[in-house]
Image (cartoon, rainbow, N blue to C red):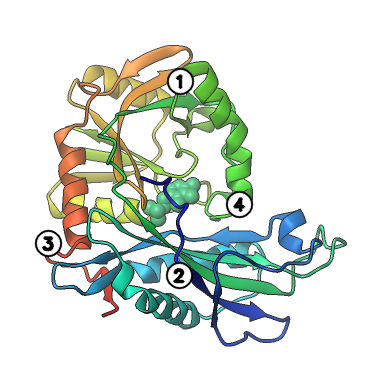
Amino acid sequence: MSQFGSVFFPEMILARFDGESWSDAEFVPSDKLTLHPGAHVLHYASTCFEGLKAFRHPDGRVAIFRMDQNIARLAQSSALLSLPEFEPAQLAEMITTAVARYADKIPTPPESLYIRPTHIGTEPCIGKAAAPSLESLLYVLLSPVGDYFAGGLKPLRLLVEQDQTRCSAHMGMVKSGGNYASAMFPTMAAKKNYKADQVLFAPGGDVQETGAANFLLFDGNELITKALDSSFLHGVTRSSILTLARDRGIKVTERNLTVTELLERVQANPNCEAALSGTAAVLAHVGTLISDGKEYTVGTGEAGPLVKSLREELNAIQWGQAEDRHGWLTFIS
Ligand SMILES: *Cc1c(COP(=O)(O)O)cnc(C)c1O
């Protein structure tokens, strides 16, 4: 199986903002883009993106999961980066048009189509270190992806990091390239020094999230996760899992969680479960937390029943095997 996100359909859909207005969207080859080497994005990281998925249902139709949420988030990221504004309807049209073009080529579950809307500042002006790009490109890449868990359900090892931050505090809810660049060094150090898979950023003891996924703790009949604030990325998967958990009668508590409380709960309850949520994996089980050089096993260290069944329930809705009772799906064909 090829690396997640390394295969693309041959064309993408693209629209240009020239400082005054948006061009009509057009299909262009997905393997090249002409940019001025002085383009704003290449120097001052005026870039943001989204990740959402489309699924082929048993009846052959194609459904996109919670597209409105991802569009709203890209609009928010664009605004926080002072990129040109776009209409949500304009991007919705681009996404559905692009997905429709390749509807026949979308694989069946557990495979899916990963959709990557991207918005970049293209104004060729290196003098704008402290000024926004007045020109931009908005495009939608399409990447067929395989079963995230094809290699088996390996529990994740997370290094709990209290000294470093994932990104600047005011950039937390922007899905922007610079944030991943800033999380890279601490993540590579955690891999090297602790054989950790990811870093759970908890600056000053406040449990936030990892480099690209939200963190959820299940303790008894309670799901605890950080309440929405501007310090972290508001995952669509997080919100979906919280909704499904509430539907089941699980007590969902959105509040700050300290590292001390997290480790106390994990040690006190041998049935605790922890997971990372994100579009790629839906819910990935956390087996071990590493903090101050000590290792803490979460639950049995293996995939627990709640995380597994919530992932399966969300997948069943996405895959057309369970009722879409919250109206999360947009059908293409
Ligand atoms: C994309 C992302 C998530 C997960 O968001 P989903 O909408 O669930 O895919 C969480 N944290 C960060 C930093 C992200 O970039």
Q: Cβ of disc 4 within 8 Å of ligand 1?
A: no
Q: Position of residue 73 (x, y in %)?
A: 48, 64
- The three-letter code of the residue at mark 4 reads Gly
- Is residue 88 toward the left or the right of residue 167 in the image? left
Question: What residue is at 32 percent from the left and 74 percent from the top?
Answer: 103
Marked residue nearer the N-terminal end (2 or 4) = 2
Which residue lies under the disc numbered 4? 177
Question: What residue is at 47 percent from the left and 33 percent from the top?
Answer: 206
Question: What residue is at 18 percent from the left and 73 percent from the top?
Answer: 60
Quick check: marks 4 and 1 in contact, CB under 8 Å?
A: no
Residue neighbourhood size for the residue with mark 3, other residues' Cα within 10 Å, grouped as few (<14), some (14–19), many (≥20) = few
State the separation of the CA atoms marked 3 and 2: 25 Å
- Decide if residue 228 is in sight here: no
- What is the secondary structure assignment of the residue under circle 3? loop
Which residue lies under the disc numbered 3? 321
Residue neighbourhood size for the residue with mark 1, other residues' Cα within 10 Å, grouped as few (<14), some (14–19), many (≥20) = few
Quick check: marks 1 and 3 in contact, CB under 8 Å?
A: no
Which residue lies under the disc numbered 1? 195
Classify 297 as above or below 197: above
Q: Position of residue 296 (x, y in %)?
A: 34, 17
Answer with the quarter of the image where residue 69 lies. Answer: bottom left
